[in-house]
Image (cartoon, rainbow, N blue to C red):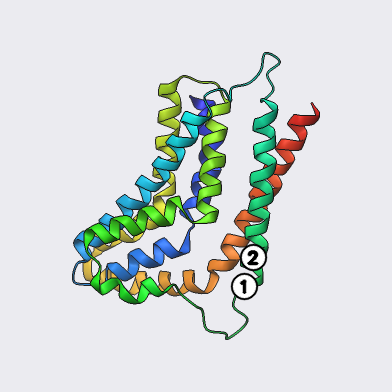
Amino acid sequence: MGEAIGQILSYGVAVALSAFPIIGVVLMLATPRARSNGPAMLLGWALGLALVGTIVLLVSGGAGPTDQGQPADWVSALDIALGVLLLWVAVKEWRGRPRSDQEVTLPKWMRTVDSFTPVKALALGTALSALNPKNLLLSIAAASAIARTGTSAGAQAVALAVYVVLGALGPGAPVVLYFVLKERSKHILDGLKLWMERNNTAIIAVICLLFAAKLVGDGISDLSS
């Protein structure tokens, strides 16, 4: 179990640093339905991560190490493919980053959060974690890393739960601040929102580049062993 958890710590932190869900939660916490929509979006985010991870673990039932202790060739090939896709995301985000005083373009849904119901907030959180390219690829990579350890199903489930908890820390932080500090949290959350808006693309690009290099390197190393 320790090995499986160790494999996903960095992936969980990377997923937690996702700007749009953090910004979305902050915006929802400024609406009349803050007490229900904020936690609902956070729950949806966690459900999306758990869903992708569970599917990958079920599909990767035979991803454990070979008798020689090396991952199966298809697992190494998957690492390389995920790394290449993450590299593509990194380049795309870096090229689309705002220049100097250029206004940051935010998704249209952020302008309609006042009309969200808890169900819609839940669905949005799920979609952001399960369908966003960066988060989807990192979740697949994390679950694949858990599966290849060859540990028991129970240990893999615990490792996946740790990954989900870590991945929820980013969107979860504003929710905790809101309920703990109440009105005093507004200044902190506004500052966090502005910082994430300005640095979103750079954060995504760097994270994707680092994990692209790791996955491609690991895949090539395993195939050549």
Vertical side of 210 occupied by 93: above or below: below
Q: Residue at x 69, y 50 (%)?
A: 84
Q: Which residue is mark 2?
A: 92
User: How far across and how far down the image is residue 81, in percent?
Assistant: 67, 44
Q: Which mark is residue 171?
A: none
User: How far across and how far down the image is residue 220, in percent?
Assistant: 76, 37
User: How far across and how far down the image is residue 60, in percent?
Assistant: 53, 29
Q: CA distance from mark 1 to mark 2?
A: 6 Å
Q: Residue at x 68, y 18 (%)?
A: 69
- Indicate left or right for 29 with 215 as reference: left
Q: Residue at x 58, y 27 (%)?
A: 148
Q: Can I make out residue 180 in this image?
A: no
SS type, badge 2: helix
Q: Give residue 35's quadrant in the image.
A: bottom left
User: From this viewpoint, which residue is outermost toward the top?
Assistant: 67
Q: Residue at x 66, y 18 (%)?
A: 66
Circle 2 residues within 10 Å: few <14, some 14–19, many ≥20: some
Q: Nearer the viewer, residue 191 or 32?
A: 32
Instruction: Give, as a three-letter code, the residue at label 1.
Output: Gly
Q: Which residue is mark 1?
A: 96
Residues at badges 1 and 2 in contact (C-beta under 8 Å)? yes
User: How far across and how far down the image is residue 88, in percent?
Assistant: 67, 58
Circle 1 residues within 10 Å: few <14, some 14–19, many ≥20: few
User: From this viewpoint, which residue is outermost toward the bottom?
Assistant: 101
